Image: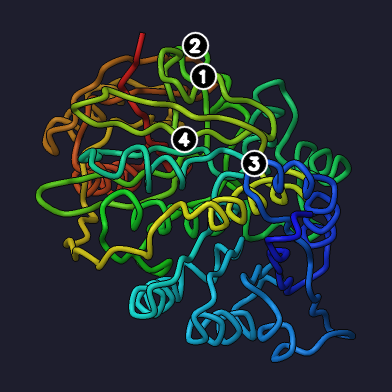
Amino acid sequence: MSAEQPPFRVGLLGHGTVGAAFEELLAGRAEEIERFNGRRPMISGVLTRSQGDFEEILAGCDLLVELMGGLEPARSYLLAAIAAGKDVVTANKQLLSQHGEELFESARERGVRLRFEAAVAGVVPVVRVLEESLSATPIERIHGIVNGTTNYILSEMEKGSTYAEALAEAQSRGFAEADPSDDVTGRDAAAKMAILARLSFGSPVHLDEVRYEGIEHLQLDDLEYARELGLGLKLVGTAERRDGGLSVSVHPTFLYAGHPLASISGPFNAVTVESGGITEITMSGPGAGGPQTANAVLGDVVSVMTGGARPPAPPLPLTLVTDVQSAFYLHLDVADQPGVLAGVTKVLGEHDVSIRSVVQRGTGEGARLVMVTHPVLESGLAHAVEQLAAFDFVRSAPRTIRVIEEEFL
């Protein structure tokens, strides 16, 4: 360590899987960081449930890293650190998606940096790209596979595993928690999309404003029919400009093979950014895990040490749009009798739903109609499906899944 430069002191809140991995990683790379940065980073204090004092750690650090998780006391600790003029790094997606604007405003008032690369998409550097490389680019849409657990489960289901089998395998391999609720319901991805929407469009988005749907209800036959139609299934988060406003959602979504997210399999994450000036940029890499998240956290620490990034920009409120156009996959189990297809197409036509492709199969006394529509307002399709479900010849509740038509070849 240089005699002229004191160490760069990092206070660490939380010492679980990610916190321990970060401390080990920081120690292992401290010499290399000092070589190009002039100061050696070091952990100056650690706070856990059984050790450390927050006030002492705050007073003795140059930067505070929060890896505790949860909303409290993490929120209070970060606000206290910002009020004290300390730069902060966090991997806490739930905190940012529910209290991000409060934290951003506080950081802006104090002129400190709030870094959170590790909160979204594991080691994929989407936050830094949006904040720095594309900061002057008008983003039109950002799609993401931002939950490695669900991507792994869907990849296994496409190979023929049931949902229960794929989830059990994900848990045995450490890709899913013992309680996977936040992942499989889409809530984890929704929190990340709230953060990405704020970064991409400058508009505050709270987790509760993100429409999300999970993967628990998906059936193997949906994936089998989709293959015949040239489609693959992902849990996709989308934030995009719509009708002068902003639409943010997370849903199971079918993709054609030419879409850059279609080939992302297993526990990997990927994000595609679209803009008129750049067409599209796709970034991919491993999803969250101890070493992966620790690497993203360390990148933020080094960014602060080298003076990178600015305090968060003021918000630019946009109206949230909830009724948007999309293509859809529509699955109908019906009785095999005359007039059924005519009745279905009549209802769809009345609601301006046009069909791109159809697969029809007999099932003994019944039949299965699987269709992909052209883009239609979600409300229009919902009304059509409600009307179809009321027919006596429809044997089970119709199923719909969104389809992204765009392909980048």
* 200 relative to 350, above or below: below
Which of the two discs, 3 and 2, labels the residue nearer the N terminus? 3
Q: Which residue is mark 1?
A: 225
N-terminal of the pair, mark 2 or mark 4, is 2
Q: Secondary structure at mark 3?
A: helix
Q: Secondary structure at mark 4?
A: strand
Q: Position of residue 10 (x, y in %)?
A: 70, 68
Tell me the number on the disc at residue 228: 2
Task: Indicate left or right for 399 with 54 as reference.
Answer: left
Residue occupying the far top of the picture: 409
Marks 1/4 in contact by CB < 8 Å: the verdict is: no
Q: In the rendered image, which quarter contains the N terminus?
A: bottom right
Q: Which residue is mark 3?
A: 36
Residue 323 x %, y %: 21, 51
361 up-or-down from 167: above or below = above
What residue would you read off at disc 4? 271
Q: Would you identify the image quadrant in which residue 19 lies? A: bottom right
Determine crowd level at label 1: few under 14, some 14-19, many 20+ residues with C-alpha closer than 10 A.
Answer: many
Q: Residue at x 23, y 29 (%)?
A: 343
- Marks 2 and 4: which is nearer the front? 4
The CA distance from mark 1 to mark 2 is 5 Å
Type of amino acid at the residue the image marks with label 2: Glu
Q: Are marks 4 and 3 in contact (CB under 8 Å)?
A: no
Give the residue type that dot 1 points to. Tyr
